Image (tube, helix red, strand yellow):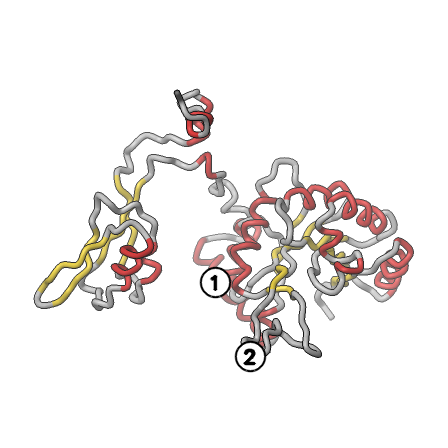
Amino acid sequence: PNNAIIASLMVETREEWRTIVRRCEDAGADGLELNFGCPHGMCERGMGSAVGQEPKVLEELLNWVTEISNIPVLAKLTPNITDIVEPGMAAQRGNADGVSLINTIKSIVGVDLDDFIPLPKGRGASSNGGYCGPAVKPIAMHMVGALSKTPGFKLEISGIGGVSNWRDAAEFISLGCTSVQVCTAAMHYGYRIVEDMKVGLNNYLNSKGFASVNELRGKAIEQYKDWGDLDINYKSIAKIHEDKCIGCQLCYIACEDGSHQAISIKSANGNRVPQIIEDDCIGCNLCSLVCPVDGCITMEDRDPSSSFDSWNKMLAENRFNPTDTIIPKN
């Protein structure tokens, strides 16, 4: 084949790692991906996510491989961890050439409510599995972004998790990925989907005037801030475009029952039309998310000329003491 072949590996002992690395190199593999992320079946035997959840062990196993490997080595990381930065930095200390993330998320997909056996069933019992596909994409992008913006993290990143079309791929690349991987979508639609992604991504790059995908890589990182650095004076409110409204009142129900009661119902030409109560709207965006009509509800900035302020700025200037909200004053 004309494309690179990356061998995915997961074994137990140091000698087994040495053996499998040599065999893959002899077979012509262009790179190795060490599976430190599988959350079921293997972690019980000290492999997969059992390694990915222990940065020191991950680093040691990587050193076993990188000291003998003659081809690039990726560490595939588990999302079943509190802070992805720790195993990411451990992979760097272990001399990996890059990391790939995320692997699947430990999960139970359902329960049969007739016999009360979790799904999927096998001989009257079940266990957890690994959740994947489009639902895990936001989690994957968060973890990719967290590594990309970590000072001192220098490894290449291969993004995994819910990549189903060219937009998904572009988003991962904008968060710093040098490659993306596709599994679930290829299972559903076949390998042809990859060609469709390439065409779509090329068209997008051309529309943005990017000479290559390298100009897209990492474009979103500078704007990906910690919560404490966001502008607390920023305000947006919802606007309902009455000419597009179909009167379903889903926005009213969502806001009334689940948010800030910032939508009222008015009568207009015999119809009941939702209307934003601007003073009460906090810009949570819930109404636009439940609206079934594209463009019917939009979010509009208010007071863009207000001065910038942030939580971290307030703390740095001693304008707020966190203990004031914790320790009551006598």
Labels 1 and 2 touching (C-beta < 8 A)? no
At x 60%, y 52%, the residue is 177
At x 38%, y 36%, the residue is 231
Q: How crowded is mark 1: few (under 14 residues within 10 Å), some or many (20 or more)?
A: few
Q: Where is residue 173 in the image (x, y as percent from the top left)?
A: 56, 53
Q: Which quadrant: the N terminus?
A: bottom right
Please state which of residues 187 and 130 is positioned toward the viewer in this rendering: 130
Please state which of residues 291 and 252 is positioned toward the viewer in this rendering: 252
Give the structural element (helix, strand or loop) at label 1. Answer: helix
Which residue is situated farthest in the left direction here?
269
Q: Which of marks 1 and 2 is in front?
A: 2
Q: Where is residue 2 in the image (x, y as percent from the top left)?
A: 72, 68
Q: Quadrant of residue 245?
A: bottom left
Q: In which quarter of the image is residue 129?
A: bottom right
Q: Residue tagged by mark 1?
A: 203
Give the amino acid type for the residue marked by disc 1 in the picture.
Asn
Give the amino acid type for the residue marked by disc 2 in the picture.
Asp
Q: Looking at the image, is mark 1 or mark 2 earlier in the sequence?
A: 2
User: Which disc number belongs to residue 114?
Assistant: 2
Give the structural element (helix, strand or loop) at label 2. Answer: loop
Q: Residues within 10 Å of mark 2 (few under 14, many from 20)?
A: few
At x 54%, y 59%, the residue is 137
Please state which of residues 259 and 130 is positioned toward the viewer in this rendering: 259
